[in-house]
Image (spheres, rainbow, N blue to C red):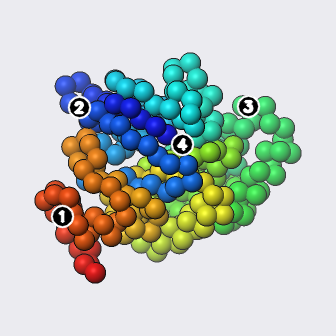
Amino acid sequence: MFALDNVSKSFGSLQVLKPTTMEFRTGESTVLIGPSGCGKSTLLRVLVGLVGADTGTIQFDGVPITPKNIQQLRQRMGYVIQDGGLFPHLTSRQNVGLLATRLGWDADRVRNRIEELAELTRLPRVALDRYPSQISGGQRQRVGIMRALMLDPAVILLDEPMGALDPLVRFDLQEDLLKIFRTLKKTSIMVTHDMGEASFFGDRVLMLGEGEVVQEGRLEDLIQNPANEYVARFINAQRIPQS
């Protein structure tokens, strides 16, 4: 789905993402983990085109990403951030349907797709016509997921989508989100710092440290055979039980 060749990103004198060459495979659920500042969110934003890479090239589904085609390609990428990232002056329904309306979908098509997604994400219908400030954090996140899925994208990218939720709401949303991925057979890339979440979602886990991938594989591989002291410390800090 994505192929990176020597991709790097700096902000001023700080190199946040070191030259990286890797692939994200179609149909796979990949989780990026690591502490704050390790480069995982920057990598996700480079993939979705919110920030441009300083070096290297990125291909999306076999097509090189360029400044000229990124807007069109982004329509095939769903993007979810913490707390939904909703426009406060629009209702949930308006937030979800905004891009589809801008692209010329007729009203019936927009309405039917929103109803379909509300059922899929288990969002109460009453929440559709309320503003973000009038619904709960878990409901805002469900609306954010609906918006990301509105155009039926090829891939969905999630940047710590459940980091601000309380444990019970987070548990329910994790369960529902995994069912959505499996039902729609979506390629997904998720950023988290939570090892339990990485285990729950990840077919493949990539641990980042200081702007580069330091280990990848199943979470069990990282727990049982950490590549270095950095990986071992991160795992032990979260009290992951050894099997």
**Residue bearing the label numbered 2:** 15
**Residue bearing the label numbered 1:** 232
Give the secondary structure at mark 2.
strand
Q: Position of residue 230 (x, y in %)?
A: 16, 56
**Could you tell which of marks 3 and 2 lies nearer the N-terminus?**
2
Front: mark 1 or 2:
1
Q: Position of residue 106 (x, y in %)?
A: 84, 38
Q: CA distance from mark 1 to mark 3?
A: 48 Å
Front: mark 1 or 3:
1
**Residue bearing the label numbered 4:** 1
Q: Residue at x 20, y 30 (%)?
A: 14
Task: Report the amino acid beneath label 3.
Answer: Leu
Q: Position of residue 69 (x, y in %)?
A: 58, 23
Q: Residue at x 19, y 69 (%)?
A: 236
Front: mark 2 or 4:
4
Foreground residue among 72 and 144 = 72
Task: Report the amino acid beneath label 2.
Answer: Gln
Q: CA distance from mark 2 to mark 4?
A: 25 Å
Residue 121 image-quadrant placement: bottom right
Front: mark 4 or 3:
4
Residue 207 image-quadrant placement: bottom left
**Could you tell which of marks 1 and 3 lies nearer the N-terminus?**
3
Foreground residue among 108 and 226 = 226
Using the image, determine if residue 152 lies above or below residue 74: below
Give the secondary structure at mark 1.
helix
